[in-house]
Image (spheres, coloured by chain):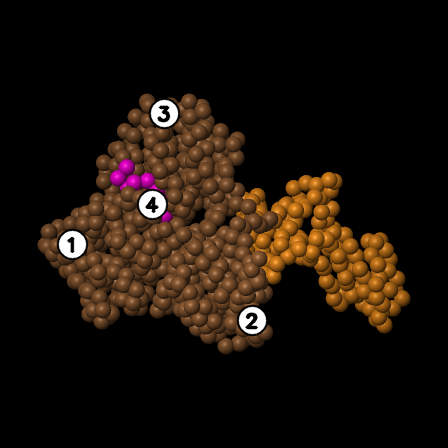
Chain colours: A brown, B orange
């Protein structure tokens, strides 16, 4: 037994090190100075200094989405911590494992409205999976171990740990004990599907004539795309992905019928609407998928597999609920299919696919690019797909460009597509891309963004220079808040209330001012060549400002309050 | 429909606020809420009386269960149970007539007068929430209610069934 003594700050660093943390994303301040001093005196963990704490959370988030590891954030008390709130909410909505370490004023001052005091545990309560207040020095290592365990198991999510300054002091020391194998009597995520439910599910799948697999972010989080592909190929069924689930199966797989939902493909939404059995895997029937729940797929028997029981029958009643980790359940389903000697009903399948292919032939996602006219944003995404062989990590901001990225960059693999799906956080893209680049410095990492979103965390261009993070930023610049504008066109008779940008900066000069390369593209002729040039610059961040057609809308689009398959196919054209 | 939920959870700081926060965040109804440590000091037990249809109740139970501090939750109203609430009520008892009447009503409801002032009686009554409401209603016809406080209901399942770790 060692009797070596450590300060609270040293314990935090030692605990993180024991949990194999490589990076902390953060920003120093009064209450965490001792912690920063402890970080300074070790080499296991690298600290990445951001320019705004919100960006630290998104960087940690992007890092986590790309690697599957827990993202770690460090912020000081008060404003440092509250700046993390948006990033925590973003991670929470998309079930991203994250641990946010927040400074706090000394325990003796808590509740006194002390300088930079905020009840961050209180502020974040509705948007965390759990949170901890540390009140005793010796508790610190195991609280951090628990935080990681909770963040990364079951349905993952962010965990906040509040560290009061007086627990960090270098002169107050205690022995360090950590139990990295955490057990909690109040938290045992149910990991396997109930065998009876598996049997029921397989029976229903076997009897189905028009089966569709609908999979979401759960597949990505569980790294279960190979299993999913095997399952889909065994069933020979059509599969659609949610926005969060893209890459769960290859976007070019012949059974893949596109994303579903608000801007999903016509064939995906039609297939859902006409299915007799929906097998939902790690998806949560979000309102951006279902459209009007009253009209949602009335003839379908729904099998819903999810690790979170509260996601099941929340918006759409599940006929066969299966609670369990999606990879375990898929193993169980495959085993049961085998045991029951499942063979697909070829006649029914042929009819079903014939119907689906008719919907596919509508080519609902297509757009029209006329030579000599303004660049269509879709065309830019297509060009990037070709140049990067579809192998880039794509981090997106929020708006029209996000939907174009989802529609025109078919992702071959999970974790390639990094976007704020649930929260819809503008400003997410750049810092998320930076987190990905840090994890995969040799891969192409694109931040697809808009002239609105990029300005919400543009200060991080400075961080990119400091840590040499040469991401490629591609701004689909339409001089307006495109998605807002689209809704105003469609729902508000074209009254563009505060949706246009009258004083955009010169992004090229801005990129250069931050020490990067800027490339402007404003005609179709030079699109491919200049984009290629941008991707050929490996050691410098390139900011590509593409002036695109500001009038372009994202189609197809569900008609509000309608059924899942009631859609606008283009301006003024209903399906 | 009214439901009584019993929740067994870790006796940790902030655990109660997570429950209360969840109810307000998701717009669930709280009719009453009581909380105290159990015989095992590391555990707290919360009883919440709430109103909602089956779908809402299913979500409440699932969402509460999802909280990390929560060990178990059960809907007592699903099966036979005992439910009690404590009432303390201070009423005007100025003259013989009103004193006699208050004492008589209190006896009928099996309440106890626990404090007497120059012009007031304080009565303690335990029972189902309905009984307490009926008692207050009856009292209000005979005298003036100065102040009343109710504990919110607590409950326990009948028979062998127990909510424990």
Give how far across and how far down residue A488 sits, in percent: 30, 58
Q: Nearer the viewer's eye, disc 1 or disc 2?
A: 2
Left or right placement of residue B29 versus residue A74 in this view = right
Residue A153 or residue A139, whichever sits in front: A139
Residue marked by disc 3 = A344
Helix, strand or loop: magenta stretch: loop
Badge number at residue A124: none
Q: Are marks 1 and 2 in contact (CB under 8 Å)?
A: no
Residue marked by disc 2 = A172
Q: Are marks 1 and 3 in contact (CB under 8 Å)?
A: no
Q: Tag 2's secondary structure?
A: loop
The magenta segment:
A244-253
Residue marked by disc 1 = A532
Chain of the residue under label 3:
A
Reply above or below: A275 against A17.
above
Q: Is residue A397 visible?
A: no
Residue shown at the point (81%, 67%) measured from the top left: B92
Q: Cα distance, mark 4 to mark 2?
A: 46 Å
Reply above or below: A355 against A317.
above
Residue marked by disc 4 = A414
Give how far across and how far down residue A221 sits, in percent: 40, 46
Q: Tag 4's secondary structure?
A: loop
Q: Are marks 1 and 3 on the same chain?
A: yes
């Amino acid at each position: 037994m060692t009797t070596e003594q450590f300060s609270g700050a040293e314990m935090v660093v030692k605990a993180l090190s024991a949990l194999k943390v490589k990076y902390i994303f953060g920003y120093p301040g009064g209450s965490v100075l001792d912690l920063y001093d402890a970080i300074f005196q070790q080499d296991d963990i690298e600290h990445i200094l951001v320019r705004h704490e919100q960006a630290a959370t998104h960087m940690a988030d992007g890092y986590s989405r790309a690697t599957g590891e827990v993202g770690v954030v460090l912020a000081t008390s008060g404003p440092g911590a509250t700046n993390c709130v948006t990033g925590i909410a973003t991670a929470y909505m998309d079930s991203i494992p994250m641990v946010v370490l927040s400074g706090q004023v000394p325990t003796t001052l808590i509740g006194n409205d002390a300088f930079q005091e905020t009840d961050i545990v209180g502020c974040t309560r509705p948007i965390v999976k759990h949170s901890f207040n540390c009140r005793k020095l010796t508790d610190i290592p195991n609280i951090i171990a628990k935080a990681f365990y909770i963040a990364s198991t079951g349905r993952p999510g962010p965990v906040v740990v509040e560290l009061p300054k007086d627990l960090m002091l270098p002169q107050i020391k205690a022995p360090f004990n950590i139990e990295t194998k955490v057990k909690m009597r109040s938290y045992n995520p149910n990991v396997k599907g109930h065998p009876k439910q598996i049997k029921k599910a397989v029976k229903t799948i076997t009897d189905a004539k028009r089966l569709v697999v609908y999979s979401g972010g759960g597949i990505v989080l569980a790294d279960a795309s190979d299993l999913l592909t095997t399952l889909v190929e065994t069933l020979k069924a059509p599969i659609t992905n949610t926005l969060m689930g893209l890459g769960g199966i290859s976007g070019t797989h012949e059974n893949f019928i596109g994303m579903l939902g608000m801007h999903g493909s016509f064939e995906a939404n039609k297939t859902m609407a006409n299915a007799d059995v929906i097998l939902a895997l790690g998806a949560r029937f979000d309102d951006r998928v279902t459209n009007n729940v009253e009209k949602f797929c009335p003839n379908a028997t729904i099998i819903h597999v999810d690790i979170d029981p509260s996601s099941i029958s929340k918006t759409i009643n599940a006929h066969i609920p299966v609670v369990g980790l999606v990879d375990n359940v898929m193993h169980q389903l495959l085993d049961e299919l085998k045991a029951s000697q499942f063979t697909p009903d070829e006649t029914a399948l042929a009819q079903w696919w014939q119907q689906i292919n008719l919907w596919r032939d509508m080519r609902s996602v297509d757009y029209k690019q006329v030579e000599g006219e303004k660049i269509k944003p879709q065309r830019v995404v297509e060009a990037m797909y070709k140049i990067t062989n579809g192998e880039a990590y794509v981090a997106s901001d929020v708006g029209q460009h996000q939907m174009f990225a989802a529609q025109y960059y078919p992702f071959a693999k999970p974790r390639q597509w990094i976007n704020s799906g649930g929260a819809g956080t503008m400003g997410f893209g750049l810092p998320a891309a930076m987190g990905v680049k840090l994890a995969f410095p040799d891969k192409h990492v694109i931040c697809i963004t808009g002239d609105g979103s990029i300005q919400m965390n543009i200060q991080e261009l400075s961080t990119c220079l400091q840590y040499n993070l040469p991401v490629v930023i591609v701004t689909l610049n339409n001089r307006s808040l495109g998605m807002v504008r689209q809704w105003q066109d469609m729902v508000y008779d074209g009254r563009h209330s505060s949706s246009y940008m009258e004083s955009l900066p010169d992004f090229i000069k801005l990129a250069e001012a931050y020490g990067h390369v800027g490339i402007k593209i404003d005609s179709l002729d030079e699109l491919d060549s200049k984009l290629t040039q941008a991707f050929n610059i490996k050691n410098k961040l390139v900011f590509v400002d593409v002036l695109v057609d500001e009038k372009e809308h994202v189609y197809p689009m569900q008609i509000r309050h309608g059924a899942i398959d009631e859609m606008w196919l283009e301006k003024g054209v209903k399906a | 429909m009214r439901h009584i939920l019993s929740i067994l959870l870790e006796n940790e700081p902030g655990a109660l606020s997570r429950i209360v926060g969840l109810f307000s965040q998701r717009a669930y109804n709280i009719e009453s809420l009581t909380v105290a440590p159990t015989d095992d000091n590391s555990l707290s037990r919360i009883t919440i009386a709430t109103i909602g249809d089956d779908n809402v109740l299913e979500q409440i139970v699932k969402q509460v269960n999802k909280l990390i501090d929560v060990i178990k939750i059960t809907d007592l109203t699903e099966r036979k149970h005992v439910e009690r609430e404590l009432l303390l009520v201070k009423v005007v008892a100025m003259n013989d007539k009103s004193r006699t009447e208050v004492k008589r009503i209190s006896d009928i409801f099996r309440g106890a007068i626990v404090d007497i002032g120059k012009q007031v009686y304080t009565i303690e009554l335990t029972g189902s929430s309905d009984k307490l409401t009926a008692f207050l209603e009856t009292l209000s016809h005979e005298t003036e209610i100065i102040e009343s406080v109710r504990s919110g209901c607590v409950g326990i399942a009948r028979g062998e069934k127990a909510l424990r770790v």
